[in-house]
């Protein structure tokens, strides 16, 4: 007998987190492609969200917009949703009491990171409160909580009593991540040349990345800098010995712009040790950019031998090697490691999860 998997797609046009929106879209396309015989995929969306994913059996558009829906679901008010097999690529899900045994209803959610617990000051207070509240609802009502790595799962188990309901399903690079033909023009528009090191992390952790840029004689390009953080990060770079002219602070970029930035990079440095899916490190490996990452459980899980995972005090030395003698080796290892992650593979595991439940 077939089944219909209902996927919550709440961020496709109003992305609270661009990576989550991209992941939700890519996963849904893969779920359609890997659907078992007799099974199909339906989308559940807030009012005002335009879904253009070929192959969906139906789009259930709810009466509330995303903001109102998030507030309603936080309170456990879920009119018009219905039951069945529901999977959310984020925490946004109708988490209420249901009968999995008799009605065959299931609800699963996804938690990509624990920023609301490990770096709460980096998020708006309302976002932190909402995420924590939704995890509490997940503890009561989710049939499974999907996390992208074992390290994130282990940390979540310390935070929430989920009684063995944590499941690990890794993410992947965006399906459209390729070196753009106009990469040079895109870098010029971003006031970048090439040969720099790409950095990700918080203001505190980026200090090690800036010192590595100095040691390797390279400029530094920071990706995903929060709005308004440029002056502070420039000060951190200066304190690490990197002049302001060589510290390029950039916010959220499109997939094509990120690919263009990586196309001009000598190495990528992930400085944040917290429990999270390392979006940019996976992208860098996919594009063959040597990766250096601070020692953490998540980086060991995801990057593994696809990059240099080192103590924070050893980042500078590792970057010097990554842009020099070790460049070719790390590029090949990273590209090989990136093949472990695909949205088709993730989708097959999501179908398997609901079959197991």
Image (spheres, helix red, strand yellow):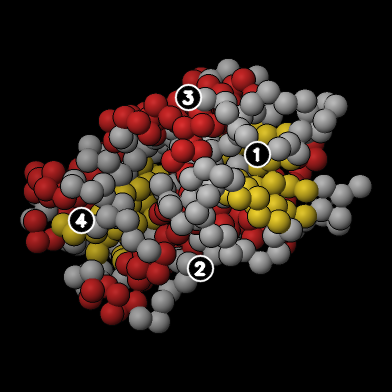
In front: mark 2 or mark 1?
A: 1
Label annotation for residue 39: none
Look at mark 2 in the image and give the residue it sits on.
176
Q: In which quarter of the image is the C terminus?
A: top right
Question: Tag 1's secondary structure?
Answer: loop
Q: Nearer the viewer, residue 221 or 103?
A: 103
Q: Indicate left or right for 98 with 169 as reference.
A: right
Sequence order check, earlier mark of 2 and 4: 2
Label annotation for residue 80: 1
In front: mark 1 or mark 4?
A: 1
Q: Indicate left or right for 249 with 109 as reference.
A: left
Label annotation for residue 133: 3
Q: Quadrant of residue 33?
A: bottom right
Question: Tag 3's secondary structure?
Answer: helix
Look at mark 4 in the image and give the residue it sits on.
249
In front: mark 2 or mark 3?
A: 3
Sequence order check, earlier mark of 2 and 3: 3
Query: 10 Å neighbourhood of mark 3: few (<14), some, or many (≥20)?
Result: some
Q: Which residue is found at the position 27% from the left and 41% from the top?
A: 202
Check whether the beta carbons of the residues at disc 2 and disc 3 lie within 8 A of each other: no
What distance separates the C-alpha of mark 1 from that of mark 4?
Answer: 44 Å
In front: mark 1 or mark 3?
A: 1
Q: Which residue is found at the position 46% from the left and 38% from the top?
A: 68
Residue 83 in the image, given as x and y percentages of width and height: 73, 36
Residue 174's place in the image compared with 300, above or below, is below
């Amino acid at each position: 007998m077939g089944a219909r998997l209902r996927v919550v797609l709440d961020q496709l046009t109003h992305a609270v987190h661009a990576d989550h929106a991209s992941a939700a879209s890519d996963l849904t396309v893969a779920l359609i492609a890997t659907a078992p015989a007799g099974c199909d995929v339906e989308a559940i969306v807030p009012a005002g969200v335009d879904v253009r994913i070929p192959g969906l059996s139906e789009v259930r558009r709810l009466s509330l917009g995303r903001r109102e829906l998030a507030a309603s679901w936080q309170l456990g008010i879920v009119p018009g949703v219905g039951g069945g097999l529901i999977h959310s690529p984020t925490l946004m899900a109708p988490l209420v009491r249901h009968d999995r045994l008799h009605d065959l209803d299931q609800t699963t959610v996804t938690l990509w990171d624990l920023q609301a617990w490990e770096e709460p000051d980096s998020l708006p207070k309302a976002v932190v409160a909402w995420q924590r509240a939704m995890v509490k609802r997940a503890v009561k009502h989710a049939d499974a909580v999907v996390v992208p790595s074992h390290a994130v799962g282990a940390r979540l188990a310390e935070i929430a009593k989920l009684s063995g309901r944590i499941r690990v399903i890794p993410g992947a690079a965006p399906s459209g991540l390729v070196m753009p033909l106009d990469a040079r023009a895109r870098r010029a528009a971003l006031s970048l040349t090439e040969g720099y090191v790409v950095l990700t992390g918080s203001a505190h952790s980026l200090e090690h990345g800036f010192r590595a840029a100095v040691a390797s004689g390279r400029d530094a390009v920071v990706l995903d800098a929060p709005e308004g953080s440029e002056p502070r990060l420039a000060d951190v770079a200066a304190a690490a010995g990197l002049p302001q002219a060589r510290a390029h602070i950039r916010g959220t970029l499109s997939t094509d712009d990120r690919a263009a930035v990586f196309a001009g990079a000598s190495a990528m440095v992930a400085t944040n040790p917290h429990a999270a899916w390392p979006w940019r490190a996976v992208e860098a490996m996919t594009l063959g950019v040597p990766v250096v990452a601070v020692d953490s459980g998540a980086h060991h899980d995801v990057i593994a031998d696809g990059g240099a995972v080192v103590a924070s005090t050893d980042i500078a030395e590792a970057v010097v090697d990554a842009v020099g003698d070790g460049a070719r080796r790390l590029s090949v290892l990273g590209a090989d490691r990136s093949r472990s992650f695909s949205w088709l593979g993730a989708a097959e595991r999501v179908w398997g999860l609901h079959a197991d439940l």
